[in-house]
Image: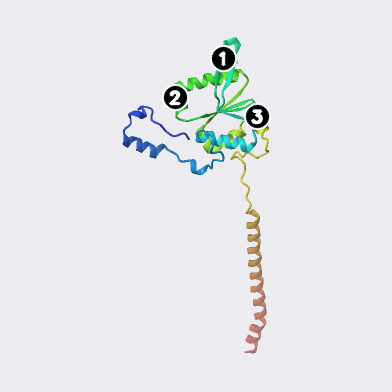
Amino acid sequence: MPRRVDYTRRRTQLDSAERRRRNRTYSVNRSSAFIDPFPNVQGTLPEKIVFAKLVDLGYHFEFQTYRRFKIPDLRFNKDYRPDFVLPQEKVIIEVQGSYWHSQSKQIEADSFKFAIYQLLGWKVLAWWDYEIYDHLDQLFYDEPRLVKHNRHGKRLTTGREAVRDDSAGIRTLNRKRAERQAYKKIIKTKQSRRARQPLLSRSIFNG
């Protein structure tokens, strides 16, 4: 879930106590769960997580490079800098920060930019930072173009697969072993009773 932010007051207007409270409430330290394999690559944490995943899956991509987008009929000619461009898959991935990209002006700018991408035949994937943190494999799995061009053939988990119970066989063996031991105990008890019965009868009749 995205962190909750109170937009009624600007951050610059907050006093020090309020800032400390919000930092304790809203900040999430996720760096300990991610070991950056490319420390020389500049980017935010969610961008670097996607970067490492794309490399791991074997995609050819461009990271934050300027591209010229032209639409002659609309007299549109402008450079944009998408976060990730996958030319062979014709896919653009934009990493959306939950705070900045929730602003009304930024929403309008993003919508216009995505519309330009789509008019030129690109598939636009806008991934929120909290989605990247929580279920990155699911984001890849939901896009058929990315699943199809998984070059290293690595399996993407969706979280919906049934969990395989590897201990079922061991539990079955333990149950059967306990049943056999209980059965042996019953047989041994019956045999001991049968062995004592003649002696008890003789002692009664001979008394």
Where residue 103 is drawn, which disc sits there? 2
Q: Amino acid at mark 2?
A: Gln
Q: Measured along the vertical axis of the image, is residue 121 above or below residue 172?
A: above
Which of the two labelled residues, at mark 3 and mark 1, occupies the earlier sequence position? 1
Q: Secondary structure at mark 2?
A: loop
Q: Position of residue 161 (x, y in %)?
A: 62, 41
Residue 128 in the image: x percent, y percent?
51, 31
C-alpha distance separating marks 1 and 2: 26 Å
Could you tell me residue 117's position as x and y percent? 58, 20
Q: Which residue is mark 1?
A: 77
- Residue 150 is situated, as x and y percent measured from the top left of the image, at 66, 35
User: Could you tell me which secondary element the residue under label 1 belongs to?
Assistant: strand
Image vertical order of residue 168 relative to residue 26, above or below: below
* Of labels 1 and 2, the one closer to you: 1
Q: Earlier in the sequence, mark 2 or mark 3?
A: 2
Mark 3 is on which residue type? Arg
Q: List the residue tagged with mark 3.
A: 145
Q: CA distance from mark 2 to mark 3?
A: 30 Å
Residue 141 lies in what quarter of the image? top right
Give the residue type at disc 1.
Asn
- Of residues 183 and 47, the one drawn nearer to the viewer in this rendering: 47
Residue 102 in the figure: left or right of residue 9 = right
Q: Residue furthest front?
A: 40
97 and 166: which is toward the camera: 97
Labelled pair 3, 1 in contact (Cβ < 8 Å): no
Sequence order check, earlier mark of 1 and 2 = 1
Tell me if residue 195 comes above or below residue 105 in the rendering: below
Q: 164 or 11, which is in the foreground? A: 11
